[in-house]
Image: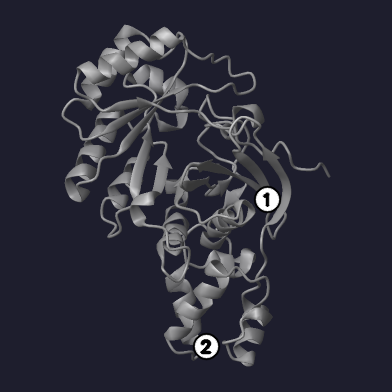
Amino acid sequence: MTGGAPLGIGVSALDRSGLQEWLAEAGQPRFRTGQLVRWLYQRGVASYDDMTDLPAGLRETLADQLPLARPRLETREVSELDDTRRYLWRLADGTTVESVGLPAEGRLTVCFSTQAGCAMGCSFCATGKGRLVRDLGPGEMVDQVRLVGEDFGLRVTNAVAMGQGEPFANYGATLGGLRFMNDPDGLGIGARHLTVSTCGLVAGIERFASEPEQFTLAVSLHSAVQATRDRLMPALCTQPLPRLRAALQHYSEATGRRPSLEYALVDGLNDSAEELAALIGFCTGLLCHVNLIPVNPVGDSGHERPSDERMRAFLDGLTAASIQATVRTERGMDIEAACGQLTQRHAPEG
């Protein structure tokens, strides 16, 4: 089983160890786990009846005890700018959730959700304007990635837990989903091409540092000035910046991996010379890469994108301080599929 995933969603609530445990209790040999995972997430069949190498009795028991239901596509929008695609899925219990497909030469990245809604309430994020509906199960995360790949007719090369929700608030299920994506019996995506993007939950970062896989970590920083960060990310005010930096230092030392720090620049709020100096101070001596992102328009947040000059000043300032930094190329702007813009706004009413 995985913490946080509701049992009412059937087989999608279980990670690989949960499937293995269920099959063992049903008196099945261990190799059945790999067979079941391949049918569920590599081949993506719609019914247990299609799992032809499983005994008929087992298929009947699975259908009775672990219902199998795939997400149903509600809406699909395609960017005229870059072929980014935004999807709204309706899950087995009626919950809706979104994901995004980002094609590029030689690769396909899927931004998937780990929760329906979000409780973090970050001021620059449309998802946080609503409420947390529920955690997603591992299978619901994998299905988003698999179905986007099917829609493009391409193999998914990268997946990022950067859609709706805070991945570390649904830690067990998120890791279960990543492992299915990495599993040769599942999607077979390399661990380094699977990224978790967190608001900066310290306990989650510390726990993530001990995982055996080489998954990638991205952390939403957005300011290295405590008062500014508290304004932007009020749910994180109990986890001050020194604790976050210590957790990142521990992560790098334990894994040898370089986390990314996401920094959404907001005009007149976190784009001053003082904010730049604080960011340089935070990053100095820390193995990290800074992703600079001009904030995207979100409802009535009042946040405006900074000038090109301010973006350049931050990039030049970080580079001069020998801190790796890039400006993220925004995708899907015309369909509001860029960072922080996902909501369930396309769901039919009623």
- Front residue (pair 134, 149): 149
Which three-letter amino acid code belongs to the residue tagged 2? Ala
Q: Is residue 77 left or right of residue 222?
A: right
- What residue does disc 1 label? 89
Q: How many marks?
A: 2
**Label 1: which secondary element:** strand
Residue depth check, mark 1 versus mark 2: number of the one nearer the observer: 1
Residue 307, horizontal then vertical, whole percent = 46, 9
Residue at image location 18% in from the left, 25% down from the top: 284
- At which x and y percent is residue 72? 71, 56
> Which x, y percent locates residue 277?
26, 13
Q: Is residue 64 left or right of residue 315?
A: right
Farthest residue, direction right: 350
Residue located at (47% from left, 59% from top): 177
Q: Which mark is residue 26?
A: 2
Mark 1 crowdedness (10 Å alpha carbons): few <14, some 14-19, many ≥20: many
**Kind of residue indicated by mark 1:** Trp
* Relative depth, front residue between 181 and 25: 181
Q: Secondary structure at mark 2?
A: loop
Q: Is residue 307 left or right of residue 94?
A: left
